[in-house]
Amino acid sequence: MRQSFVKQSLLASAVFVLTGFPAAAQTDSDAPDDALPGRAVYENFCQACHENAADERAIPFDQLVNLPRQQIEAALGENGLMAPMAASLTADETSDLIDYLVSGQAAEQDQSAWTDTFMCAADNRTVDLTGPETWKTFGVNTEGWRYISEQASGLSQDDIRNLEIDWVIGEPDGFQMSVATANVGDTLFYAGGGNLSALEQDTGCVRWTYRFGEQTRSPLTYGEIGDQKAILFVENERMIHVVNAETGELIWQADGQPLRGDGGDIRPGVILHEDKVLVPISASGVFPNVESCCTGHGALVVLNAEDGSHLWEYHTMEESSPNGLFNDLGQPQQGPSGAPIWSQPTVDVTRNRVLVTTGENTSLPATNTSDAIIALDLDTGEPAWLFQAMVGDAWNAHCRGTDETSGPNCPWHWDEYNIGRDFDFGGAAVIVTSEIDGESVDLVLAGQKSGHLWALRADDGTLEWAQRIGQGTALGGNHWGIATDGETVILTINDPVRPGAPTPRPGVFAFNVSDGTPLWEHSAEADCDDGRGERLVRCESLFGFSATPLIVGSSVIAGTLDGKLFAFDIETGDVLNEIDTTAPLTSINGLPVQGGSIDSHAISAAHGMIVTGSGYARFGQNTGNALIALTPTDGE
């Protein structure tokens, strides 16, 4: 019985992290062929989760059958995110399963040249990099504020009130529509559908395309490397590409893996700081194989910006070894493992340090580096200080539901350690200077999936203040990060609504930076009227604010899992604008397009424009394939 559960939960984990192809509810025409042998594989190993409405992480079956073959194959392949789960199936079972899931889809077409259909006119394909650099990196500035002034953005609060959808691009095989763009002058850089493209901002037409062929959910970083202006991004969560921003030609590429240990994926993007590229490593055995769980752990790798060569690396723990524990199948376990780095690093220029935030341990023994904020010397990687927000958070994907229903490798099985909650730091730390008791103090701020907002002294990591909204959940609390204008800090809370879960507090919450005083809050509510309930999955439960917010002058921009983009006044919390990105859309590139969940790194800005991805279907959320540009109307 236990082994049957293991295969079910592992394969479910393998597939729910794939994001969905944009599609409406399944119809008879796209239903898979039940006569195929993969149907039995699905029923035996997948159905229990994918047709269980209470399982918030498993993508529903009607979305699952619309995932492109290449995405499923890549995730389950030798170097894929879900390679450990594929190891629990035979090769024939895996092949049969994939064949079954995609059997109802129309014949695949080569989409590698999809940007060719909306190229700019021949005399409008020059990228001019002498204009203002409005958006260079996901955190906006070195300190990771996620704040841009009205002047730099070209957007006043009146403009924000009058934002409307300007143009939309439909990405073929829409996949994790969360990628933050970069903007220089009148060029908007965007990576999606296997291409990095330089778009004319006003019309969305393509000036050049660099084809890399795989998928990405990496925020883009723009900066100077030697005498070239470059765009940096991560392909398929593994390969770093550095591309000439003017011409679209490759400068260099590297996998960025550490020299020791298992290495892993690069879930966020990379940071370019002076002559260094900072690479966070986050794959950590969160989705473990059955035997000898777990071995992976987080790391930070620093490369030479000129050529991608290795400079130094930091590991969140020592290499794993047998820990003396055995799972319910009698298989030996390993540890320590985990403490992945899910977010982009933040550079503390004043102290010549880099700050990283970490997630939970995935096996025992627990370490002091999990669920932590860590300051490292920027030249050597030596730790300067460490703040652990939650001790002993040992959790992995076997921990589903209760101890009785969990897989054999869940650390919950050892009662004395029964405190695993999966309360990662999913977003980056932020550095801000504040006046405290007449003293100018640099603070490090960070949100956590526990619902906490932490403020530490940047000099030594001591706690200055903390606030908590709700009780947190594995997919709730503050999921992807915070934003600040230096005086107010914005904490978004996801907290899905589901039976048996802690009392949810989804919404947007504002606090004073200096002392944590609450300023205002906006409570999220489900909106399933006017056809939204029919076109959204789990409309009554998935409506929280999960994506990292953005502050534009005196306005806060935040997105919801039910596809809405909100704008708030930062002083009062009044709603300035509300835009439904799941409403019917028409693409400028002629492809079918629909919006879905706004999540992860989705929201960015260009001069006079807000840009968002809509359709982040990871964790069974709402599929979509829309890159949406919003500009102000004249208000009439």
Image (cartoon, helix red, strand yellow):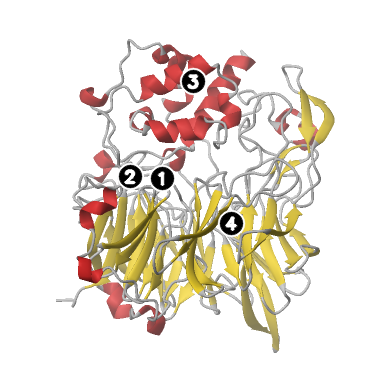
Q: Nearer the viewer, mark 3 or mark 2?
A: 2
Q: Quick one: SS at disc 1? A: loop
Horizontal arrangement in the rendering, residue 57 relative to residue 192 (left or right): right
Q: Nearer the viewer, mark 2 or mark 4?
A: 2
Of 542 and 274, nearer the camera is 274
Work out which quarter of the rendered image holds the N terminus and state it: top right
**Position of residue 230 measured from the top left corner of the image (x, y, whole percent):** 48, 67
Quick one: label 2 or label 4, which is nearer the N terminus? Answer: 2
**Position of residue 241 measured from the top left corner of the image (x, y, whole percent):** 51, 56
Tell me the amino acid under the disc marked 1.
Answer: Gly
Q: Is residue 115 above or below residue 351?
A: above
Of 24 and 469, nearer the camera is 24
Q: Are marks 2 and 1 in contact (CB under 8 Å)?
A: yes
Mark 1 to mark 3: distance in Å? 23 Å
Question: Disc 2 designates what residue?
Answer: 112
Q: Nearer the viewer, mark 3 or mark 4?
A: 3
Mark 3 to mark 4: distance in Å? 31 Å
Question: Which label sits on residue 343?
Answer: 4
Tell me the amino acid under the disc marked 4.
Answer: Ser
Question: Disc 1 designates what residue?
Answer: 213
**Position of residue 361 measured from the top left corner of the image (x, y, whole percent):** 71, 43
Q: Is residue 326 above or below residue 136?
A: above
Quick one: label 3 or label 4, which is nearer the N terminus? Answer: 3
Mark 2 to mark 1: distance in Å? 7 Å
Q: Quick one: SS at disc 4? A: loop
